[in-house]
Amino acid sequence: MNTSPATSQRAPWRDILDSHLQQTQGYEFTIATIGYDARNRPVPRLRTCGCRGFFPELELHPKGQEAMDEQVEGGGNPPVFESDMLCFTTDARMEKIPQLESSGNAIEAVFWLKDLMTQWRIKGTAYAIGDPTINVTENEKASREKIMKGLRVKGHNDGDITNWTWDKAVTKYFANHSPVARGSFRNPQPGMPRSQSPGNPALSLGQKVTDLHDHVSRNNFRVVVIYPEEVERLDLTNQEDGRRWKWILGEGGANGSLDVQWNETEVWP
Ligand SMILES: Cc1cc2nc3c(=O)[nH]c(=O)nc-3n(C[C@H](O)[C@H](O)[C@H](O)COP(=O)(O)O)c2cc1C
């Protein structure tokens, strides 16, 4: 690691959202990116994705941890970092990745948590990591640098930060998937006509992957990390008195440090 984390305090909305997610059984979010239509007009593109919580903290199921213990040095990274950045996993061959790259990484994520009658919107930029190319590509390097700015060193941790690597961080998200879900990264090219042969014998549906470093699937597997810049919570618990809060990320903290500051405003719903 050649960049230092830049933020020191949790965002004021972070623990509220975290607690809402913990109270919700199984949640997905809708992810919006910007695409371009045939006439080159910018257009919204949305899809459902599984939210994987705040990067890089992830509680693995026992089978996933077993795989990490067997295949990854030290069983994974020491738990030294936390962040306000939600993440999801995806396949590099899907459209959202080039859409992020061609739109200044613009993203919006939205949750509707019906049990809590609350909508959360997270607007910001998003960066994909996990390109396993031996010489880290420019894209991967730029993504890591941006994400690093959003990482915080956790208080009260006894881990050795020098043992932390990006590869182990991404591998943990891969391990979190079942062997069949890992195998989906060996599917034929997403979005291609099914009548068309995959053209590569390694690519087919329904494969099971137990090797966490399986070359073919890791080539396609990515973790997308959302760097939040504006967050909104809409609480409709009381229909007669809907409440809406907005947090906007401000620039820089005291003494010209890179530290960030969130400005909170309650607005009319
Ligand atoms: C419940 C559910 C969960 C999904 N989770 C993910 C996910 O975590 N990551 C992902 O890339 N696609 C996920 N998908 C598939 C996406 O909705 C979408 O079809 C796919 O990402 C291709 O979109 P794109 O080509 O616009 O990138 C999920 C779909 C559903 C219905």
Image (cartoon, rainbow, N blue to C red):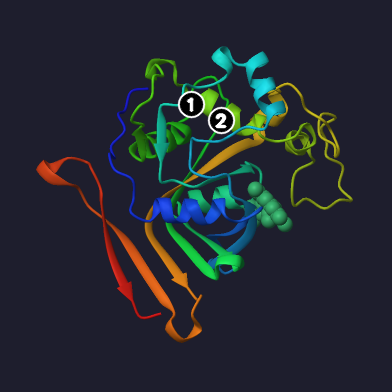
Q: With respect to residue 181, does 124 lie above or below?
A: below
Residue assigned mark 1: 166
> Within the image, what quadrant is residue 210 found in?
top right
When asked about the image quadrant of residue 214, the answer is top right
Q: How many marks?
A: 2
Point 33% across, 23% down: residue: 2
Residue in view at x 66 percent, y 43 percent:
93
- For this orientation, the residue located farthest to the right is 195
11 sits left or right of 165 in the view = left
Does the residue at mark 1 contact the one at mark 2 (Cβ under 8 Å)?
yes
Query: What residue do we see at 48% from left, 51% from top?
Result: 18
Q: Position of residue 53 (x, y in %)?
A: 53, 45
Q: Quadrant of the C terminus?
A: bottom left
Where is residue 200? Give x, y as percent: 81, 32
Closer to the camera, 216 or 151?
151
Q: Is residue 261 above or below residue 73?
A: below
Q: Is residue 156 visible?
A: yes
Q: Residues within 10 Å of mark 2 (few under 14, many from 20)?
A: many
Label 1 Cα neighbours within 10 Å, binned few <14 / some 14-19 / many ≥20: some
- Amino acid carrying label 2: it is Val
The disc at residue 170 is: 2
